Amino acid sequence: MKDQTRAPIYEALEKLRRQRVVPFDVPGHKRGRGNPELVELLGEKCVGIDVNSMKPLDNLSHPISVIRDAEELTAEAFGAAHAFLMVGGTTSAVQTMILSVCKRGDKIILPRNVHKSAINAMVLCGAIPVYVNPEVNSKLGISLGMETDCVRKVIEENPDAVAVMVNNPTYYGICSDLKAIVELAHAHGMKVLADEAHGTHLSFRDDLPLSAMEAGADMSAISMHKSGGSLTQSSILLLNQGVNEDYIRQIINLTQTTSASYLLLSSLDISRRNLALRGEKSFGHVMEMAEYARNEINEIGGYYAYGKELINGTSVYDFDVTKLSIYTRDIGLAGIEVYDILRDEYDIQIEFGDVSNILAYISIGDRIQDIERLVGALADIARLYRKDSTGMLSGEFINPKVIRSPQEAFYAEKKSLPIRQTEGCICGELVMCYPPGIPILAPGEMITGEIIEYIIYAKEKGCSMQGTEDTKVENLMVLA
C-alpha cells in the first residue's frame, strides 16, 4: 500500500515556493509581478505556483518523478492498474479512450446518449458508431441504460466491432449492468470504455453502484472536478490490467497541452488525497443530503425527485442516489424554466435544466442549509408559477437514423439551410442542449420533422443550444 497522506506535486510546489527561485522562463507574468490585477483576483499564492514544467516539478508529457508518483497514488486510490492526470477535462480522457482503440473504419458500440466528446472523437479518428438505442422513460423524457440483451444482439450482429462504450452513470444517475456488459464484450474480444464523468465517487463506497474498474472495464474517464473536489478542467483517465499505458500516453500527447497547469495538477493531487483519506465518510454525507432533499421535494407535490424505485434490473440496473434529478413538467414548467427562475429570482445555480427535468448536483462541498434553501425555493416556484401542462413536449429521446459516419459527414461538402427546410437532409454538424451535452443531432444523421420540432421547442423554452456553425441555431449545415 502506498502512503495516501502524500501529495507529491503539491509538496514539490511548496518546496519550490520556499526557494524563491528567480524565473527566466514562462509564464510571462513572472509569479504575478507582471499582472497585478490577476494577483488581486486570484491571490499571490495561487499565481505564484502557476509555473512551467521544470526538473523539480516533472513533466506531464513524460513523467518520471513527482507526477509519476501522483499518478501511482491515484491509480491505487481508484483501484486501477494505472492513472493519468488530465488537464484537458474529461473530454480529453473520453477522446483518448476512443482514439486509442479505434482507427478509421473501425466500429464502436455505444449508447446514443453519449456526451459530445465521444461523437467528436469519432469525427477525429473515423470510427463508425453502432448505437444501442436505450429504452426511454416516456414520462420523465430521459434515456435509460444499455440493456445487456440489447448489447448482446448488437455484438452478435457486429462481431468486427473493436469496443463497447458505456455511461456509468448517466447525468441523471442511471446505471447499466456494467459487469455483465464487460464480460460479454471481453468474451467477443472487444475493449470496454466507461464514460465515468459523473462517477468519481463510485470508487469510494460499497453501497453505491459498481465503478468501472471494479466491473473490469479496460478504461474509465473520471471527472474529478465534478464530484471529487478538484479544479474545473482537471480529470483522470484510469486503466485496468492488460492495457498498454505507454501507448495510451502517446495518444494523450497527440492532443493534450505541453504546458500543463500546475494549479490543475496540484488540485488533482490534493483532491485524490482527500478522497483516499475521507472519501467514504464524505460521500456517505452526500448520499444522506441527496436522499433528504429527494424526500422533501417529493412532499411538495407537482415535482418528482426520482431515485432507486426506478431500478428494474434491466434498463435501470442501478441508480446513483447522489444525483438529485427532478421532474418538473407536472407543475406546467419545463426544467429549463425552473432552472432560470431559480437563478434569476432565488440566486440558486443548479447544474442544468432540460425540457422535463432539472439536476441539482450534490457533492462534498454542499451543506444541509443549502439543501433547505433549494427545497424552499422549489416549493415557492410550485406555488407561484404553476400552470397547465397541456401541450408540453416530454423531451423523449428520438432514435437517430445514421446515414454516414460522423467523420465523413463533418468533412463533406455542406450547405446552410433554414432549420424548417432541413427535413430529409443529412446533418453535417452537432446540435445539442448544453448541459448535458448529449447531441440531438450528430454529423451523418437524418434530420426528421420530429427532431426539427424538438430543437425549436427547446430553443423557445430557453435551452442553451450549441454545436452549430450558426450560433443562433436558425440554420443547420447539411450535406450538399
Image (tube, rainbow, N blue to C red):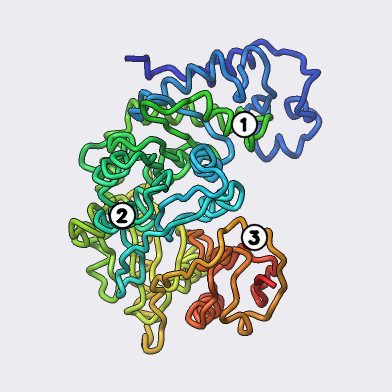
Label 1, residues with CA under 10 Å away: few <14, some 14-19, many ≥20: some
Contact flag, marks 3 and 2 (Cβ < 8 Å): no
- Give left or right: position of 117 versus 108: right
On the image, the x and y values in percent for residue 414 come to 71, 69
Foreground disc of the pair 1, 3: 3
* Amino acid on which disc 2 is placed: Val
For marks 1 and 2 on the same chain, the one whose residue lies earlier in the sequence:
2
On the image, the x and y values in percent for residue 142 come to 36, 67
Foreground disc of the pair 1, 2: 2
* Amino acid on which disc 1 is placed: Asn
Rounded to the nearest angstrom, the CA distance separating label 1 from label 2 is 32 Å
User: Residue shown at 28%/50% (left/top)?
Assistant: 320
Label 2, residues with CA under 10 Å away: few <14, some 14-19, many ≥20: many
Q: Which disc is residue 253 wearing?
A: 1
- Give left or right: position of 291 versus 230: left
Q: Which disc is residue 151 wearing?
A: 2
Q: Secondary structure at mark 2?
A: helix
- Seen from the viewer's position, the closer of residues 85 and 49 is 85
Rounded to the nearest angstrom, the CA distance separating label 1 from label 3 is 24 Å
Marks counted in the figure total 3
For marks 3 and 2 on the same chain, the one whose residue lies earlier in the sequence:
2
For marks 1 and 3 on the same chain, the one whose residue lies earlier in the sequence:
1
Rounded to the nearest angstrom, the CA distance separating label 3 from label 2 is 27 Å
Residue to which mark 3 is pinned: 410
* Amino acid on which disc 3 is placed: Phe
Classify 219 as above or below 467. above
On the image, the x and y values in percent for residue 133 come to 37, 63
